[in-house]
Amino acid sequence: MKKYLLDLTVRSVERIHERYVLIRLTDEKPLPEMLPGQFVEIRIDGSPTTFLRRPISINYVDKDANELWLLVAAVGDGTRKLAELKASDLLNCLLPLGNGFTMPQKPEERILLVGGGVGVAPLLYMGAEMAEKGCQPTFLLGARTARDLLMLDEFRKYGRVCITTEDGSEGEKGFVTNHSLLHKEQFDRIATCGPTPMMKAVARYARQAETECEASLENLMACGLGACLCCVEKTTDGNLCVCKDGPVFNIHKLLWQD
């Protein structure tokens, strides 16, 4: 896909959690086509300790409003600077980058989308695009506590939402791979994004269930174009750049070690 370097206008910044903000961006022209699972590299202005662009997953694309949504965890100098943006500010973005998730070919496909923490971000857009094609996804979302669950109302617009929390404050207690759903139902495919230990556990489940599974990796990515080689991942096809050859990979290509 063609890549664009755009100065997008901040339409709003909403703090949805003590650590997370939802940034809505727009442009005078129609936004480029973007696929679920792709990401954006953002230039951080005004942060003396931030020299490289920051990769942020595409959370949602509102085509009617011509908006791009980015769910940002404000955990470092660069992302905390993003959280300080105001409406009408400009944000320099390189997009869309990487390869996305495999989308359903038939409405009857049963697809499970598993996310944890800020890793839920790309699954919202995937679920929305699936629903538009007449395929209802099932979301399995995990967090430490009920307070850490993100954007549940948005997810519920597009499919069934199942929840786990580590302390049992909402949904079933435990990790996503402990949810009773996985013992009761079969799925044609799984897509997952979140902390690496969670994705490894989901991958183990998928192998045991003989279910196709894709994982969106979150390796450190500096350039987003496969030039700097800082995001290299060992795969069955050799060392690949997550930013260019991913971030979405079939789990059978990943040489993850338990």
Image (cartoon, helix red, strand yellow):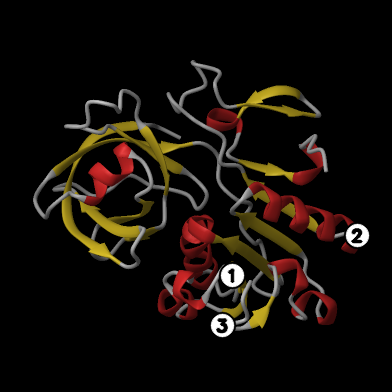
Q: Nearer the viewer, mark 3 or mark 1?
A: 3
Q: Is mark 3 on a helix, strand or loop?
A: loop
Type of the residue with mark 1: Leu
Q: Earlier in the sequence, mark 1 or mark 2?
A: 1
- Characterize the local packing of mark 2: few (<14), some (14-19) or many (20 or more) Cα atoms within 10 angstroms: few
**Label 1 vs label 2: CA separation?**
20 Å
Which circle's residue, 3 or 1, is located before the other in the chain?
A: 1
Q: Is residue 188 placed above or below 101 in the rendered structure?
A: below
Image spot of residue 47 (x, y percent) = 22, 31
Between disc 3 and disc 2, the foreground one is: 3
Rounded to the nearest angstrom, the CA distance separating label 3 from label 2 is 29 Å
Which disc number belongs to residue 169? 3
Select label 1 or label 2 by which is in front: 1
Query: x, y percentage for residue 239?
Result: 70, 21
Q: How many marks?
A: 3
* Drawn side of residue 23 relative to residue 237, left or right: left
Q: What residue would you read off at disc 1?
A: 141
Query: On screen, 42 above or below 61?
Result: above
How far across and how far down the image is residue 94, in percent? 33, 33
Among the 4 quarters of the image, the one containing residue 211: bottom right
Dot 1 alpha-carbon crowd within 10 angstroms: few under 14, some 14 to 19, many 20 or more: many
Q: Is mark 1 on a helix, strand or loop?
A: strand
**Quadrant showing the C terminus:** top right
Residue 254 to residue 109: above or below: above
Which residue occupies 61% across, 77% down?
Answer: 163
Q: Give the camera-side residue of 14 and 88.
A: 14
Residue 243, how many percent across, how many down? 53, 31
Q: Is residue 21 left or right of residue 229?
A: left
From the image, tell me which residue sits under label 2: 208
